[in-house]
Amino acid sequence: MSRLLFLALFLPALSLAQPDAEPEAAYAPIRQLFDGMRAGDSTMVRHAFYPGARLQSAFTGRDGKPSLSEGSIDEFVKAVGTPHEEQWDERIWSSDIRIDGQLATAWTEYSFFLGDKLLHCGVNAFHLFKSEDGWKITQITDTRRREGCLSEEPDEAAAIHKLLDGWHRAAAKADADAFFGAMTPDGIYLGTDASERWLRDELREWSRPFFERDKAWDFTPSERQLYFSDDGRTAWFEEKLATWMGPCRGSGILTHTPDGWKIRHYNLAVLVPNEKMQGFIELMKQ
């Protein structure tokens, strides 16, 4: 199961294992809303909202102008409870919850299915209030589009492995566009020398002679470990590398962008065995 799916479906269970259970509590009415929609249970949906809650949608109209429309909670709840043949199934791919006192926000990516048919996708921006009856939804503003929608949970770990493996292959094939295209514009690369700290475009300029050859450099990765932030938007990793310098370790940070995962920071270090460290120290003194 990917990290994003884990967060979307099991965030409450995760939070209960932590000292602060508020993220689980704040997420509860959101889960209640979508469970109620799938079940066609208007009472369940109604109880997820705080009195006076608002529904809004931000979109680009047919005239190409930005628009913000507002719907009625009463009409929405009534529509949920009106018998319909096909299930309303809004699937949440990721959740990012922020809390301060009685206020919480949640940013959730979704795809909406009518039965088995994918209708649209986008983002829900929730505002929630912690009332005497617990957390309640005070506002939802969503976006809606039909392009680039997910029909199933993406395997983010597989996507990152593919990106990093392709990044190393691009250097081995001297494919500068692929190599530097895998980094964010503000990406940083730290080399093994103390002076080697480059922004992406600085590294591209410095390494131009290498990429004009058949091979820039050829590092073979192994034993890579991945880690994800709670919101699933940031990842970091460590990997061992077989290089012309001998064993090295690479580590870095990735950011999830509209174009997929990109490398934002990479640190390359030569591995010196402990039993050889004294000789290394003496060498560095020369």
Image (spheres, rainbow, N blue to C red):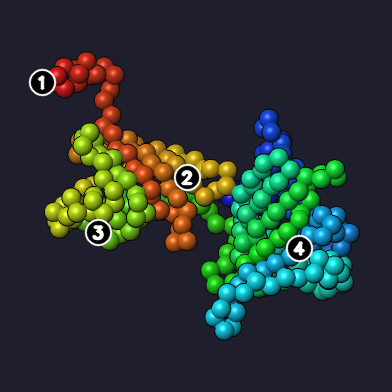
Alpha carbon separation for disc pair 1 and 3:
37 Å
Between marks 4 and 3, how big is the CA–CA gap? 51 Å
Element type where label 2 sits in the image: strand
The answer to whether the residues at label 1 and label 3 have Cβ atoms under 8 Å apart is no
Q: Of the residues tagged 4 and 1, which is closer to the observer?
A: 4
The reply to whether callout 3 and callout 2 are in contact (CB within 8 Å) is no
Alpha carbons under labels 4 and 1: distance apart: 71 Å
Q: Position of residue 90 (x, y in %)?
A: 70, 63
Mark 3 — residue?
175
Q: Which mark is residue 70?
A: none
Horizontal and vertical percent position of residue 161: 42, 49
Q: Earlier in the sequence, mark 4 or mark 3?
A: 4
Pick the front one: 132 or 34: 132
According to the image, label 4 marks what residue? 54
Between label 3 and label 2, give the one nearer the viewer: 2
Q: Which residue is mark 1?
A: 286
Q: Amino acid at mark 1?
A: Gln
Amino acid at the residue labelled 3: Asp
Q: CA distance from mark 3 to mark 2?
A: 25 Å
Residue beneath label 2, please?
235
